Image: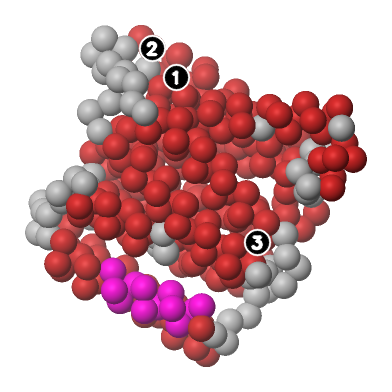
Amino acid sequence: MWLALALVSAVLLGIYDVFKKYSVNDNAVFPVLLFSCSTSALLFVPVFIMSAVHPELMKSIGLYLPALSKHEHFLVILKSILVVSSWIFAFFALKHLPLTIVSPIRATAPVWTLTGALLIFSERLTPVQWAGLGVTIIFFYLFSTAGKTEGISFRTNKWVWFIILATLLGSASALYDKHLMRYYDRIAVQAWFSVYQVVLLLPATLLFWYPRRKAVPFKWRWTIPLIGLFLVVSDFTYFYALSYEDSLISIISVIRRSGVVVAFTFGALLFREKNIRRKSLYLAGILAGVILLMIS
């Protein structure tokens, strides 16, 4: 069941990446982040209210929001700091790089998550899973060569390093998520995380963007609230998958990042990005590795 949930999360995450790219193209990054995250937080307002007014009803449908202690709130704030930092770097990279370059780099997160899972959670992979992981890593490396044909150096381009840093922070967040799902309620974690990300982004937007709003104007686009909507649903299925005792964060992370297929396809069709045939070949290799992991 947790594999199916991870796959649903992957598809939603791919669509979410497309909405992000459309929203930040020639646009101010911080307001896009703030308004999309505000949408996520607003979606949980009914959950907060109904959990207080009709707790039994919310328990019966699996959406009850229990109270958190001060220590638990602190842990969720740490998660929010990790994720918001990752998103800031990722959104800026997405603004300046093709989606068909960003998405595969972002999909390398499972490699780093796997390393952490082996060290922290003592997870063990089968030989077939190791083979799948090896194939995935090889084709991720080959993807870096595709960037050179578009004048994007993976060594010197600032925005490439932004997306790499965002990926590393995202991997750390994934490992932290596994820890949180072991001991704390997933609805409470997701709901309060959605609130705290707005709390963090509001002062950041006022500090880094508002003084420069004339030089970097903000344009409202209909995809901005959809970023928050698709993120909430994707995270809901992701946390649900992690809540299973036998779930493996290393495998869930790989499957979730396979949403690159959706983002890649739309990047090719909607944004008319370059070098699609070569990138498609490398993407097929990445998917082969993911399929090996799923079959095993």
Circle 3: element type: helix
Whether 65 is drawn above or below 48: the answer is: below
In the rendered view, does 19 fall on the left or right side of 49? left
In the rendered view, does 45 fall on the left or right side of 5? right
Tell me if residue 105 can be seen.
no
Q: Nearer the viewer, mark 3 or mark 2?
A: 3
Quadrant occupied by the C terminus: bottom right
Q: Nearer the viewer, mark 3 or mark 1?
A: 3
Which label is found at residue 205? 1
Report the front residue among 186 and 102.
Answer: 186
Circle 2: element type: helix
| Residue under label 3 | 241
Residue at image coords 72%, 59%: 243
The amino acid beneath tag 2 is Tyr
Tell me if residue 279 can be seen.
yes
Extent of the magenta region: 283-294
Residue at image coords 73%, 65%: 244
How packed is label 2: few (under 14 Cα within 10 Å), some, or many (20 or more)?
A: some
The amino acid beneath tag 1 is Thr
Looking at this rendering, what residue extends furthest in the bottom direction?
127
| Residue under label 2 | 210
Give the mark nearer the N terminus: 3 vs 1: 1
Classify residue 191 by image quadrant.
top right
Whether 294 is drawn above or below 20: the answer is: below
Classify residue 216 by image quadrant.
top left
Classify residue 82 by image quadrant.
top right
Residue at image coords 65%, 61%: 241
Circle 2/circle 1 CB separation < 8 Å: yes
The amino acid beneath tag 3 is Ala
In the rendered view, does 57 fall on the left or right side of 44? right
Q: Residue 157 in the image: state x and y as whole percent.
A: 21, 46
